[in-house]
Image (cartoon, helix red, strand yellow):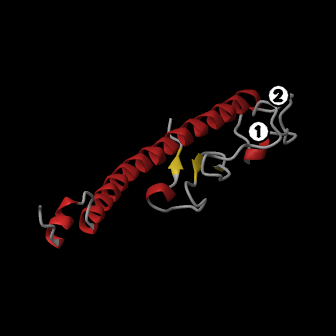
Amino acid sequence: MKKLSLKTIRSNKSGMTLLEILMVIALIALIIGTIGKNVFSKFSGGKRKITKIYLSEIKGALDQYKLDCNNYPKNIAGLIENPGNCPSYATEGYMGGKKKVSQDPYGCDPFYSYDGQTMVLKSLGQGCQEGGEGEAADILFED
């Protein structure tokens, strides 16, 4: 008859030690952290590209207004309702009949100014405040 000892019983058990489990969890966390960072950076880069497309659509509406009225509007609301000084103003406005200029992908209203010489059109980026860095940096429309 075979004699059983405590050492023999322990070595016959299958399973993983606490150290092995912790190593697997740490490895999974490292992989998820790396993948998550890459996915997030692609998402935020895509948001900036969509914002540039959004700004180009508004610029197209501003250019159409200029063709009809011989000048850019004084403010962005001129794309929605006739400011009164343009007899050739489009009956439905220049934003496809919308009652308001839509917000950018960051949830901000577009920044527009026109002083009679220079037109500035930009998105204020994440946080909706001028300036900033990274995702919060302004996105200026450039032809």
Q: Which residue is mark 2?
A: 90
Label 2 neighbourhood size at 10 Å, few (<14), some (14-19), many (20+)?
some
**Earlier sequence position, callout 1 versus callout 2:** 1
85 relative to 75 in the view: left or right: right
* Residue 4 coordinates in the image, percent (x, y): 16, 67
* Camera-side residue of 120 and 48: 48
Q: Are marks 1 and 2 in contact (CB under 8 Å)?
A: no
* Residue 67 coordinates in the image, percent (x, y): 70, 27
Label 1 neighbourhood size at 10 Å, few (<14), some (14-19), many (20+)?
many
Give the mark count.
2
At label 2, the amino acid type is Ala
Q: Identify the image quadrant of residue 53.
A: top right
Picture quarter with the N terminus: bottom left
Q: Which residue is mark 1?
A: 79
- Could you tell me which secondary element the residue under label 1 belongs to? helix
At label 1, the amino acid type is Leu
